[in-house]
Amino acid sequence: MALLEVKNLGISFGGLRAVDGLNLRIEKGTLYGLIGPNGAGKTTVFNLLTGVYKPTIGTFALDGEVLNGKSQAQINHKGIARTFQNIRLFSKMSVLDNVKVGLHNNNKYSSFAGVFRLPSYFKQEKAMNKEAMDILKVFDLDKEASVTAENLPYGKQRKLEIARALATHPKLLLLDEPAAGMNPNETEELMKTIRFVRDEFDMTILLIEHDMRLVSGICEQLTVLNFGMELAKGETSEVLNNPEVITAYLGE
Amino acid sequence: GGNNTDNTDNTATENTTTADGASENTGATGGTIKIGATGPLTGDTAVYGKAVQNGAQLAVDEINAAGGVNGYQLEFKMQDDENDVEKAATAYNALKDWGMQISLGSVTSKPCINVNSYASQDNMFLLTPSATAVESINTDNAFRVCFSDPNQGAKSAEYISQQGLATKIAVIYDSSDPYSSGIYNTFKAEAEKDGLEIVAAEAFTSDAKSDFSVHLQKAQSAGAELVFLPIYYQEASLILQQAKSKGYEPLFFGCDGLDGILAMDNFDTSLAEGVMLLTPFAADAQDEKTVTFVSAFKEKFNETPNQFAADAYDAIYAIKAALEKGNVTDPTMNYSDLCNILKVAMTEITVEGVTGTITWTADGEPNKEPKGMIIEDGAYKAM
Amino acid sequence: MEFISYLVNGISLGSIYALIALGYTMVYGIAKMLNFAHGDVIMIGGYVVFTSMTTMGMPTWVSILIGIVFCTLLGVVIEKVAYKPLRNATSLAVLITAIGMSYFLQNLALIVFGAGGKTFTSVVSMKPISLFDGQVTISGETIVTIIVSVILMIVLTLFVNRTKPGRAMLAVSEDRGAAQLMGVNVNRTISLTFAIGSGLAAVAGVLMCSSYTTLTPYIGAMPGIRAFVAAVFGGIGSIPGAMIGGILIGIIENLSKAYISSQLSDAIVFAVLIIVLLVKPTGLMGKKIAEKV
Amino acid sequence: MAMLEVSNLKVNYGMIQAIKGISFKVEEGEIIALIGANGAGKTTTLHTVSGLLKAREGSILFNGKELTKTQPHKIVEMGMAHVPEGRRIFQQLTVYENLILGAYTRSDKKEIAENLEMIYKRFPRLEERKKQIAGTLSGGEQQMLAMGRALMSNPKIVLMDEPSMGLSPLLVSEIFDIIQSINKSGTTVLLVEQNAKKALSIANRAYVLETGKIVLEGDAKELMNNDQIKKAYLGE
Amino acid sequence: MKKNVSNLNPLTKKNLITLLMCVVIFAIVQIWQASGSMGSLYQGLLVPICIYIIMAVSLNLVVGYLGELSLGHAGFMCVGAYVSSMFSIMTQNTIGNSLLRFAIAILIGGICAAIFGIIVGIPVLRLRGDYLAIVTLAFGEIIKNIVNVLYVGVDNNGVQIAIENSANINLDYANGGKMILNGPQGITGTPRDSTFVIGFILVMITLIVIMNFVNSRTGRAITAIRDNRIAAASVGINVTKYKLIAFALAAFFAGVAGALYSHNTASLSATTKNFGYMMSIMVLVYVVLGGMASIRGSVIATIILYALPEVLRQFNDNINNYRMLIYAIILIVMMIINNNDTIKDKLNIFKSKFKRKKVPKETKGAEV
Ligand SMILES: Nc1ncnc2c1ncn2[C@@H]1O[C@H](COP(=O)(O)OP(=O)(O)OP(=O)(O)O)[C@@H](O)[C@H]1O
Ligand SMILES: Nc1ncnc2c1ncn2[C@@H]1O[C@H](COP(=O)(O)OP(=O)(O)OP(=O)(O)O)[C@@H](O)[C@H]1O
Ligand SMILES: [Mg+2]
Ligand SMILES: [Mg+2]
């Protein structure tokens, strides 16, 4: 069974069909790419899969469990985490705390225990700190742990978003243009990180990207969207050589 | 405790001197007795506080000019309580630090209850000019100059029925104000006894007190012949104006809160033509006492005094009378001892004040007669 | 018939709220601040007109003009002295400063004009209109207030949407930095907003005092809050919304006094506001907040 | 005299110095690229030039006039446009209103209309969506809008902060074409780009910024062949 | 790095300093009082200051940490004040130990306020920004208005409640029936149980609870919601639930402050000034001036701003008569000094001159 199974998913805004009958199957452990021209509906797909928007038609299921209709928080509990195209960090909180918020549902103790500093508070906080630092290290952010998130440069903010999403222990990680605003070297490094995350955390990753170097470098499979509909899908190299994809998206 | 000699950090104004200093410096007439009051000097009830301040100050100045009381002078200070119970306590405390020996309590009812809870604890003599709520003076140290709420409400109903002014009555009152709702409650009880019918009882609150069209409409629709206004004059002036503009002309009847309406800056007195009120004081009364008081007040403050000012004026004279009656000759006496003397003396004096001839009962209530007044040609006339 | 009478009364009360709310919503919508001192500028406007008309005996229209000019200048000065230094601070910081300014104006008026009420002479000489054999009367003040607020609503709407300074206001209200990058003089635009808002306050002051003739240093506070409620009710920043919100609040207030309870009318007005906002979270005419993820 | 001359510029965020005394020049008619890693201070530099940030020290001369003491709106009036990082479009206004605001400093109605037509021709998507609330545009669409809006002021010089960010490969090429073509029609360009290769290929000269300092400068083509640059920014 | 992990809470030190500051202030006041040189004015200010510190700190939880502007905080205080007062009056004869009675009254006041917080919060917290602000204001005003038309009395038949008119309540006055809450006349005769020591203890409890709360998992979730609601939801935080928790906790402490208030005054009534939006705004002033999400700031700002107009009373009449005007001016000036960029920059530079030596230490801390 595929980890993510999307069937005939669609949504319209006013008259605009932003996503129109999308089908998608992602096997566990895959690095899957979602590409397409600007305004094709890629981000909207992410918004549907994470419960920000409710689909007008179609369903999607994670590990066989149908999730459409659930709230954002519930969907995250079920195992889908994401990053945002327009960075959304907890800007006034420290880098460490950003990740700890991600760990919110994995290291639980009651508000009561928190207020009265019961042993469970110390135990869980300690565990949280350790795990958060471990995750930050993966992204080379451990040195900035106490920096306020909004003061990080753009590229590091992107990484922090991924770290935070990872902290929720997802089964499926959605990355919306992770390399935007990075130079080729930084992108290279990011690619390594993404691969590392996939291998180390046994993660399935669906990502949107316009940087073809990254797409061709790490994605194993691709779906190309155009006007909310599937234009092509398959192995990366195949898709990128598809003439239709070239005219609609890649150019020469 | 209760001695006023240790207030060293008190910044002296021209006439503020500590009690023991004064006994040496002022020669033959020794020392001062300090009287303090709290009341709203800011906020939307400031007009009442200011009136009390001026009325009391006038009386104090007159008394001092005439040689003081038993050879010593009086000194008066007012602190702002913003018509707030909490601030009233603070104001009272500030006055204590200043060396207050006699308290005029608070101008308004609720703050006065709180101030008196401290004053009774301290055993400080308290004579409020204008706090009408029953609870304001429910301890033996406390007295008042004005009528209590039940007194006014009942008296009004009685008066209306005795004079046969009307049988169908509407009431417009301020439900957020203890004074107004207090009078209304007793008026209602008495009215039922006297066979008056309250056909409409419409409330407003201090948060919405400028539009009375609904209240008047309801009164009119219910066929009220008389509208009872147990409220203050600023709102009453709006009611009169709005009634006129909708062509509704019942009898209007009010209590002491209505006094002051004619003195409002630029008020069209023809609106108040025929308004009746039951008040112990009327600035337009022609008796000699009132005339002297009003003209002195006008000269000093460039304003016509209202009943708050009159009550405060009488309060100071009552204190003077009580001090004389109790034969208080030592102005440095601490407030508790002073209180013990004054609370006895109060019940023994008679004050010929501008609000009438007053005596006091031991529970602190004044005995005086309200006068029925009617406004004719822009002036009060006794009914 | 009574109902109509209540309705008319509600509209006349509401038209005052509407007029105040227009000024509120201008400043609120553009400068993104709750100008709690707005009601007090109205009060000052009332006093200025009263002084020049009654104390100094100037003709009515001259007095009104003086009032408008005075308040406009006052608004600009307040903005320069108290709000401009906080241009980059949070809107909450400006809100608190506005509260300070409100206290300041009230206490200043208390000292200058005294606590005693003054009776304002209505500036409207129009005769009331009588309907249904005199069972329902509409006062001249009401008619003038409604006409003035409708005209102002239209003028303001056109101004904001059709003129260059108006467009600058829209840009400033969204993103001051980006507006500067368009060449908009942010400081001048905000000053202009305050000038207009305060000029409107003077007009509102005159008409409010003509309807409700008692003038004290505190008359601005409560209508200010009501007008703020009206502005939110209609949708923050929406000029027609402020107008509709104001009138509706007036009607609800009066009808609930008439038919439910005069003691509970405050609670009822607020309850209706809450219900409306729960159904339409951005007010009656407010734009839906477009937030793309 | 250079059109834009920055000398010894220093900028702080609170206590932190983000720009540590940089100097550079832009001659009229040039395309100048400013490249550097994340956090090097490129955005900070552009913000300071267009007046959104205050300089601690140093001077910025634009056609001989000092900008560090000039208010941002005056700078725009002098003929500078800025496509800011993060786009900063007016989210609640429509696409059309955004574009018209771009022409705020101009009053020549007819030319504005022509200019608008030109933008629509370059970005047909914007014309399609001219009534859409800008905040609901896709990321790339917003980027086009930000670019179009800046061009509406018909600037003498335009500062662009990562104009290709979030655009599809097809559009990226197109954007660089557009930059070249507006440059040909007489607009000077100061370009910040992560896509250093593309940027250097169209630029006349370039500056390399590292942690608030300029570490390299020179002819763009030469820099492209510089090994250091190749390694650090071109990913070769 | 190890150090950072073991250092569970980088904020603890800051919080300890705040608590210490309060203890020191308390000690100074105690000594001052004991020396007998503290005037009545100052003594009278002690309990109110405790009340408003509790109010400000709890409001800071909503405004500073949750990031929602609430203009109805006084409404919750009102609930706490009235409920606790009624409780104390009713049980005055049954619970002899006044300390115990007061403790229960405080708890009941707080709990009732928290329940109101939840009732109000459920609809309110769906709204955003200024709309939320106005609805909290509306709820505060509704509470105030309802309290003003409520009549509660007790007699042999138990507690009786009526609205709008005292005549609607049929109390058996002959057999000890007693009107407790008398509409707009409010409540009189609440035992004056509040003391500075109790107030101080409550302040400390409030500070500790709220500080611990914001530095816990729940508090982090709340701050995350403030910073970015959508991102918070995306990492699995139930936004409504956590908003509600913060709101209810803040309401609880407002209720506690209300209990302290009502047991410090002989007469209780709800006006615009106390329990209306004016008081909510006054507390908001303390919060904003003290700094958002700064608990110590709230404490200090409350002490200064509450005491300021009162302390002006003891000066000569020229100052005393204009004290509210002076207060307004000082408020504006303080806001500007605190929030103006240029002035802040200058202050920072000034401060850094003194802190020079400390800087390397701080950088080291950041690198750990
Ligand atoms: N909330 C909304 N209301 C109206 N239109 C919307 C909304 N959200 C998205 N759209 C439209 O739907 C289309 C798809 O948007 P989406 O953000 O998914 O594009 P995308 O594929 O992510 O593009 P990009 O690569 O530029 O980010 C766009 O044309 C956008 O304008
Ligand atoms: N508002 C701010 N407050 C404090 N520091 C900031 C702020 N904005 C930026 N910085 C810091 O200033 C330095 C320069 O940032 P800037 O945004 O100019 O870099 P950049 O070169 O544009 O990077 P990027 O390629 O990521 O956009 C960075 O170290 C950043 O952390
Ligand atoms: Mg996208
Ligand atoms: Mg940048």
Image (spheres, grey):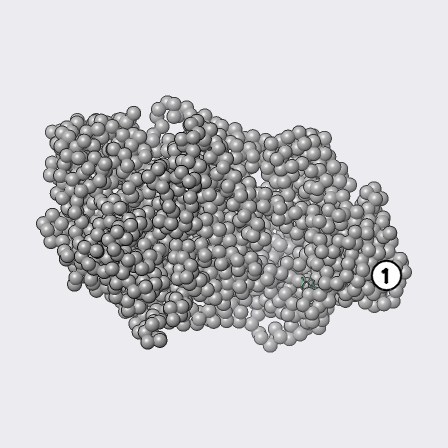
Q: Residue at x 28, y 53 (%)?
A: B192
Q: Residue at x 48, y 31 (%)?
A: E103
For residue E323, side relative to residue B334 (left or right): right
Instruction: Give the x, y percent position of residue E277.
Output: 44, 49
Question: Secondary structure under badge 1?
Answer: strand
Q: Residue at x 29, y 52 (%)?
A: B188
Picture quadrant where residue E330 is located: top left
Instruction: Give the x, y percent position of residue D214.
Output: 70, 49
Q: Which chain letter matches label 1?
A: A
- The reply to whether residue D99 is in sight is no
Picture quadrant where residue A137 is located: top right
Q: Residue at x 79, y 64 (%)?
A: A21
What residue sits right under mark 1 in the picture? A233
Q: Residues within 10 Å of mark 1 (few under 14, many from 20)?
A: many
Quick check: C53 above or below A168?
A: below
Instruction: Give the x, y percent position of residue D39.
Output: 69, 48
D77 or C161, nearer to the observer: C161
E118 or A89, nearer to the observer: E118
C23 or A153, nearer to the observer: C23
